[in-house]
Image: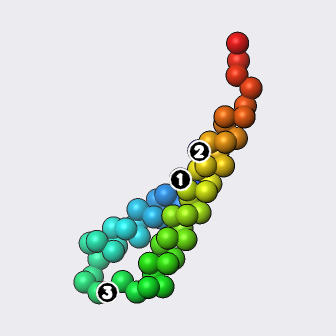
């Protein structure tokens, strides 16, 4: 997994924890959309990484 992917996953975890354990304020639609965009980008990067890995030649 690429280092940037790991950093994005860490960011998603922080955002989730803030939403659950942070100050009791309402999460805005904009914040939810930003979270979804970040999750989508990480999933895309992970899929690309998996496809690249699968295309590597196998060693006998």
**Image point (53%, 53%), residue name:** 6
Dot 1: few (<14), some (14–19), or many (≥20) neighbours within 10 Å?
Answer: few
Q: Give the residue pinned by disc 3.
A: 26
Residue 34 visible to the viewer: yes
Q: Mark 1 touching mark 2, by CB under 8 A?
A: yes
Between 3 and 12, the residue placed more toward the observer is: 12
Q: Earlier in the sequence, mark 1 or mark 2?
A: 2
The quadrant holding residue 16 is: bottom left
Q: Mark 3 touching mark 2, by CB under 8 A?
A: no
Q: Give the residue pinned by disc 1.
A: 6
Q: Give the residue pinned by disc 2.
A: 1
**Image point (66%, 36%), residue name:** 53
Outermost residue on the top side: it is 60
**Which element is circle 1 on?**
helix
Residue 51's place in the image compared with 34, above or below, is above
Mark 1 and mark 2: span between their CA atoms?
A: 7 Å
Q: Position of residue 5 (x, y in %)?
A: 57, 54
Q: Nearer the viewer, mark 3 or mark 2?
A: 3
Answer left or right for 48 relative to 38. right
């Amino acid at each position: 997994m690429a280092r940037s992917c790991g950093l994005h996953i860490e960011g998603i975890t922080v955002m989730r924890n803030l939403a659950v354990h942070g100050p009791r304020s309402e999460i805005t639609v904009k914040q939810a959309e930003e979270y979804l965009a970040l999750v989508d980008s990480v999933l895309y990067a992970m899929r690309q990484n998996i496809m690249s890995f699968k295309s590597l030649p196998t060693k006998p």
